[in-house]
Structure formats: structure tokens, C-alpha cells
Image (cartoon, rainbow, N blue to C red):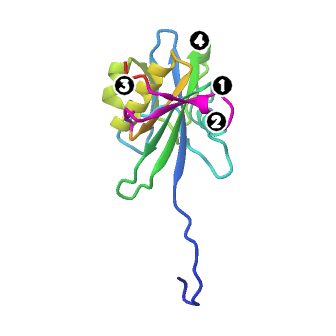
Amino acid sequence: MSDDGHFTARLPTKRMAADCLITDQANRLLVLKPPYKPTWDIPGGVVERDESPRLAAQREVVEEIGLLVEPGRLLAVDWIPQSGDFTEIVAFLFDGGVLAPADIERIVLQPTEVTSSRFVTLDEAAHLLDPEQFARVAAGFKNRRTPDAVYLENGVASTSATVVREDCGHGDQSAANSLDQS
């Protein structure tokens, strides 16, 4: 209640992030070293106000590595709870495709965003990315072979999670399928 006796609505503070899983022809993951944190990252970042996650992923890739990449299908959605000073986040992971050698040569790092880049195996990525992001990336790699996007909570797909099919219409009951745990 405000000082004048009226109820005031407090909007929840949530953030969205959108990343692209980009690989080379050897199926190695593109990772980036940002100057502002100790772990490596993948191309992507925060979704701005009134911006779709897909467009945010595309914008962030251009800003970070100078390539215009059309984000492909959604691979994973991850809800990350509040931690310390950081608010909860909903993170979208899109398939950023496979870069040909000519595309890799055209990468231009934006020094305020990225100090280094390289392609690594999934095993190497486990040691470079933060654990939650690595879990999302690993799920994305697995789901590149399926038509489904996986729902995660803090990087973990639970047995009660469902997948979202992009080819189903809104409200279609066939859009929710049980997550295959095999």
C-alpha cells in the first residue's frame, strides 16, 4: 500500500536471455570469453524490452561476433531461479547452425563483448561454461536430433517436464508430450 492509502502493483522482475548454439563442421561448439566474467559463454545475451527472444539471439550474435545468423528452431527453454543479486531468468536456446570455414574466417569479435573465441568439444565446454549454461547446451546438443524443444528448470529436465513442439498450434493438446528420458 502506498503512503496515500492506495494499493500499488509491484511488477515482478524477470529477465529473459536468448542464446544460439553454433558449431563448426566438426560439431564443435563456438564459445566466447567475455571480459566481465570468469567463465566462457556462448553467443547470446539479454532480451531487450519489446524484443522477441529469437531477434535478441540474432542481435546478440551480430554484436558479439559480427555474423548475421538466422536462429533456427528452439532447442531448450530453461527457468533459472533467483540467486543472490540476480533475478530469475527464462533462457531460450536456439539452433544457430553450422558455420562453414568461410563463415568462421569472417568472425570479428567486439572487444567490449568478447575477448576471445574458439570451438570446443562438448567435454571441453563442460570445463569452460558455468554449470547451468552447460546443462542447457548439453540438452540443446541432444535435442538437435529431435523435433522437440526441452523444458528445463535450472538446467535439469525433470521426469514431469514436457516438451513443446514447434509444429503444433496454440492450445493443441498434442503440443505437450512426455519427455523421453532414454
- The main secondary structure of the magenta stretch is loop
Front disc: 4 or 2: 2
The residue beneath circle 4 is 100
> What is the crowding at mark 2: few (fewer than 14 residues within 10 Å), some, or many (at least 20)?
many
Q: In the rendered structure, which disc, 4 or 3, sits on the residue that comes first in sequence? A: 4
Who comes first in sequence, dot 4 or dot 2? 2
Report the quarter where the C terminus lies. top left
The answer for how far apart the CA atoms under marks 4 and 1 are is 28 Å
Q: Secondary structure at mark 2?
A: helix
In the picture, measured across the screen, residue 97 lies left or right of residue 181, that is: right
The x and y percentages for residue 162 are 48, 33
User: Looking at the image, is 162 positioned above or below residue 6?
Assistant: above
Of pointers 2 and 1, the one earlier in the residue sequence? 2
Q: How far is mark 1 from mark 3, CA to CA?
A: 31 Å
Residue 99 inside the magenta-drawn segment: no
Which of labels 2 and 1 is toward the front?
A: 1
Q: CA distance from mark 2 to mark 1?
A: 16 Å
Q: Residue at the spot x=37%, y=34% of the render? A: 158
Percent position (x, y) of residue 93?
52, 32
Specify which label sits upstream in the sequence, 1 or 3: 3
> What amino acid is found at the position of numbered circle 4 in the picture?
Ala
Queried whether the magenta region covers residue 163, the answer comes back as yes
Label located before the other in sequence (3 or 2):
2
Q: Earlier in the sequence, mark 4 or mark 1?
A: 4
Q: Is residue 136 above or below residue 100?
A: below
Q: Which residue is mark 3?
A: 125
Alpha-carbon distance for marks 4 and 2? 22 Å
- Identified by mark 3, the residue type is Ala
Report the magenta residues as a range: 155-179
Q: Which residue is mark 2?
A: 54
